[in-house]
Structure formats: C-alpha cells, structure tokens
Image (cartoon, rainbow, N blue to C red):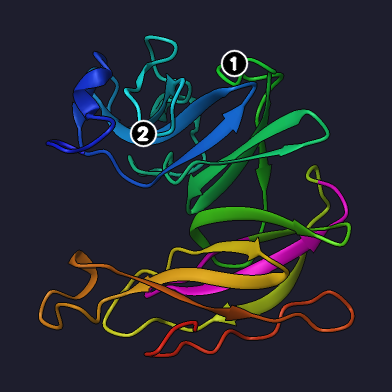
C-alpha cells in the first residue's frame, strides 16, 4: 500500500510505520470502513487500524487517529503478528470484528464501526493459523480459516456469531506453489464461489507472488461444504 495508485497508503495512519497486510472494506450507513493490519510505530507488533471514506475508491482517511487493536492488548500469543487479518460481518444491525494469527479473537463493534462494544473474546478452533472469514447461508454461519502451515483451509459452523462453533473439517488443500491459502466465500446470482490464491503466475517466487483464483463451491444437504476442487481454468 506504499505507492500509487492505491486508495489507502499506510502513511494515512500517523501512528503507523508501514507493513500493511491483509485488510477488508465493508459498507455501513453510506460510508466505507477499511480495516487494516499494520505495523505500529510506538507499540511493538502488528495493530488493526480503521480508515473511512464516502466512496469505495477513496480517498480513505484514518477514522479514529489511533489503532483499534494493538499487540499489547492480546497477550495469549507470544508473537508480534497475532493481530492481523481483520474481517467484519454485520448481522441484524450488529457488527462483529474477527482477527488473529495463532489466536482467534472476535468483538462486537458499535454502530459507528470504530469502537468496540464490550470486551473481545477468544475462539478455540483446531490448528487455527490466520485468515478468518465469515459468511452466512440458510441460517448457518460459516467461519473459515487458514489451518496449519503450509496452509490448508478449514471451517466451523454455528447458528450464532457468538458461537458455539462446531469444527467441520477441511474445504481447501494447500494451493499450488504457495504456503498460504487465504480465502473469501461469496454468493453471486445463486451460485457460490471460493476465492483464494496460489503461486502459479511466478513459479520461482512462491508465496511472495500470490495469484488470485476463483472456483465453484458446493454444499451438502445438511449445509456442510464440499471440498473445493482447485482448477487451473477457474470458473466459466
């Protein structure tokens, strides 16, 4: 995010020193909120900041003038990068923020989307690495995430975003030539799609040159997800 033509540069956060990682934009009440994992200049480790704009293409500005989450707030993991990969989901007017590496946390957000509504909590899932993502289908919430390292993709299901979450297994294998496998799951015109990345475009660069991929996702009758078949062709 350090250069043009980016709608958000890490320098928009006066408290940050660089290294902006995985992020997500979500719209609410006509504004677009961008949750960013970024290195803090004065508090060691990764932090989560929020930028806001009236337009999805920007310009985005720091929404609160400080980090929402800093590394000294999450003490379970003895690493400096456990506060990364933020993802936000809104259900019945209530926004939830999920994030983490090796430790998965979540917290409710106030309607203004820039303040925590209560204290954050921990979710225990088998071999959680990073990259949580939430989607909903037919009354079920699905929490998918990167599993082990190199990363496969696993998921859990719940009837509530507050849990309990029941682990259901893997949906994605280790993608080709890539140690990481960060996913999104979307529905468009009645079909479901699994978005991820591999390292196919630059074979000698591996995980450092991520190629965006998309394949079809299918469900079983009980709502569980079928294993995704990763293809070279992608979707039609």
Is 24 situated left or right of 150 in this image?
A: right
For the point 49% across and 41% down, the residue is: 86
Residue, disc 1 = 115
Is 67 situated left or right of 123 in this image?
A: left
Within the image, what quadrant is residue 120 found in? top right
State the SS at label 2.
loop
Residue, disc 2 = 57
State the SS at label 1.
loop
Closer to the camera, 31 or 122?
Answer: 31
Q: Is residue 10 magenta?
A: no
Judged from this view, the residue extending furthest toward the top is: 65
Closer to the camera, 109 or 168?
Answer: 109
Q: Are marks 1 and 2 in contact (CB under 8 Å)?
A: no
Question: What secondary structure is the magenta-colored segment mainly?
Answer: strand
* Placement of 91 over or under 187, stated as above or below: above
Q: Is residue 146 magenta?
A: yes
For the point 29% across and 76% down, the residue is: 178
* Other-residue count near label 1 (Cα within 10 Å), few / some / many at <14 / 14–19 / ≥20: some
The mark that comes first in sequence, 1 or 2, is: 2
For the point 26% across and 15% down, the residue is: 15
């Amino acid at each position: 995010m350090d250069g043009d033509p980016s709608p958000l540069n890490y320098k928009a956060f006066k408290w940050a020193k660089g290294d902006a990682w995985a992020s997500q934009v979500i719209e609410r009440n006509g504004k677009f909120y961008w949750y960013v994992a970024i290195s803090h200049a004065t508090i060691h480790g990764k932090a989560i900041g929020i930028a806001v704009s009236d337009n999805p293409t920007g310009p985005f500005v720091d929404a609160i003038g400080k980090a929402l989450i800093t590394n000294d707030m999450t003490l379970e993991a003895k690493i400096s990068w456990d506060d990364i990969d933020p993802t936000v989901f809104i259900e019945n007017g209530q926004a939830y923020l999920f994030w983490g590496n090796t430790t998965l946390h979540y917290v409710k957000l106030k309607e203004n989307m820039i303040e925590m509504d209560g204290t954050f909590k921990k979710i225990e899932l088998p071999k959680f690495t990073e990259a949580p993502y939430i989607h909903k289908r037919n009354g079920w919430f699905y929490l998918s995430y990167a599993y082990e390292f190199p990363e496969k993709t696993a998921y859990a299901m719940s009837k509530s975003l507050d849990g309990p979450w029941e682990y259901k297994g893997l949906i994605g294998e280790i993608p080709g030539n890539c140690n990481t496998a960060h996913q999104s799951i979307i529905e468009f015109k009645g079909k479901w799609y699994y978005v991820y990345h591999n390292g196919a475009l630059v074979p000698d660069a591996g995980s450092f040159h991520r190629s965006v991929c998309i394949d079809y996702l299918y469900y079983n009758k009980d709502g569980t997800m079928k294993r995704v078949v990763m293809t070279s062709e992608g979707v039609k």
